[in-house]
Amino acid sequence: MDYLVMHWLMTILTVDSEILSCAFVAHNFSSSEHLRLLHFIIVYSPSILKFIAGVCRFVVAPLVVLFFLAHKYWKTRITIDAVEKFLQMQQVIGPTRYAYTDIVAVTSHFRDKLGQGGYGSVYKGILLPGDVHVAIKMLDGKSCCDGEDFISEVSTIGRIHHVNVVRLVGFCSEEMRRALVYEYMPHGSLDKYIFSAEKSFSWDKLSEIALGIARGINYLHQGCDMQILHFDIKPHNILLDTNFVPKIADFGLAKLYPRDNSFVPLSALRGTIGYIAPEMVSRSFGIISSKSDVYSFGMLLLEMAGGRRNAANSSQAFYPSWVYDRLTKHEPGEISAEMHELERKLCLVGLCCIQMKSHDRPEMSEVIEMLEGSVDSMQVPSRPFFCDDEHSPVVEPYHFLSELTTISEEDELWNVNVLYSTLYYKPCFL
């Protein structure tokens, strides 16, 4: 094959030389030098072609391979470089950045483990000087592979300060090893107390904790330049300090949105089973907004009042329905006298917060007013939705102006059934 190519090239050069020679003779040009040059090219063309082939094999080919490897390496560095660029901007206004060796030293080689979750592990540490106790959350590779959760945490709580929001002391990011350093909460999370028979609070303390959580959420919604939607309000994400002051934690699912923009894209779908608002699953219940956090907070209030998880098991009745029946004793508008006054308040406010349509729920500022006010002035809200055959309401479509396309009735009913049967372990009757 190589011989044929060489023969073909030499034939072309020979013919070209003859044509040029004839042309020079026809026009009486002095072409001896040109012919000698062409003769030289024809004679040495095989060597020249071999030289070019060698250059392509030993120079061009390695360059192509190197370019491919460099391109592949650059693609793997995109996420890390994006995070690094963000962290350089964050250093001026945000918390302290620590090296990984500092994290190892602070945690004494990860000796004291506080907990484990889907995001990674939490370890106790001590910052010097001052012997400041901190909790360090080590993000595992799977949960932070794209850096989104890490950036969400640092960009939200890294800039804000509120008595009911956990403080981010610092962070670490070296390649794919990332950690978040929080102030240490010695009493752990709220779920250890409201679901435990040994550990319990008085109604006054529960009401105080509920009010603190509400103020923290309201600050996230209204007290910052951009409204912060948490999307994962639940007892496990409420931490208690030395004086049992509640602090909202875990902003890995949080998102920043302009305060004057009430519309949140459907791609923001996120949360924990049992606390996800209906509009997070089906658009017929409204748009995703700060009211989604209000719903989660309502479920949290009902759990605090009843001391029971709202998605415990399928053998139990739907939790809000159980609370409503306990509150009214099956007589609409009649409040049971057996309940403590503050218990009734938590139940009433919680039921107001978990209304089916998002526009029927109060704002967090209104929730604070209800928690601070008297229970005597509060009305019993409508019965919880998707309860049973007798009280199940007919779901009417919710109309709103947005860029969303119309969802088909079949898909809507399917989504609603997923919400009722999967999230709350009870069949839906629509």
Image: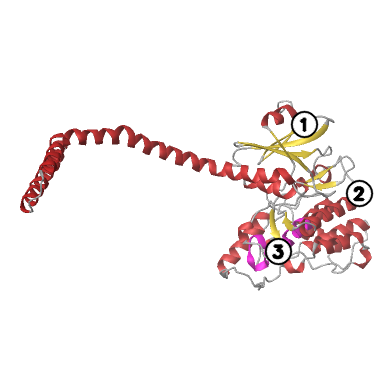
Mark nearest the camera among 2 and 3 is 2
Q: Position of residue 74 (x, y in %)?
A: 49, 41
Looking at marks 2 and 1 on the same chain, the residue that comes earlier in the sequence is marked by 1
Q: Is residue 16 left or right of residue 65?
A: left
Q: Disc 3 versus disc 1: distance between alpha carbons?
A: 46 Å
* Residue drawn at the location 93% of the way across and 56% of the way down: 340
Checking the image for residue 125, the label placed there is 1
Between residue 64 and residue 264, name the one nearer to us: 64
Looking at marks 2 and 3 on the same chain, the residue that comes earlier in the sequence is marked by 2
Between residue 286 and residue 402, name the one nearer to us: 402
Q: Disc 2 versus disc 1: distance between alpha carbons?
A: 29 Å
* Span of residues in magenta: 279-298
Name the residue beneath numbered marker 2.
Answer: 205
User: Which amino acid lies under the numbered mark 2 shown in the image of this protein?
Assistant: Lys
Between residue 337 and residue 356, name the one nearer to us: 356
Above or below: residue 330 compared with residue 88: below
User: Which amino acid lies under the numbered mark 3 shown in the image of this protein?
Assistant: Phe
Above or below: residue 56 compared with residue 336: above
Looking at marks 3 and 1 on the same chain, the residue that comes earlier in the sequence is marked by 1
- The 10 Å Cα crowd at callout 3, few under 14, some 14 to 19, many 20 or more, is many
Name the element at disc 2. Answer: helix
Name the element at disc 3. Answer: loop
Q: Position of residue 278 (x, y in %)?
A: 68, 62
Q: Position of residue 310 (x, y in %)?
A: 75, 53
Name the residue beneath numbered marker 3.
Answer: 386
Q: Quadrant of the N terminus?
A: top left
Q: Is residue 20 left or right of residue 227?
A: left
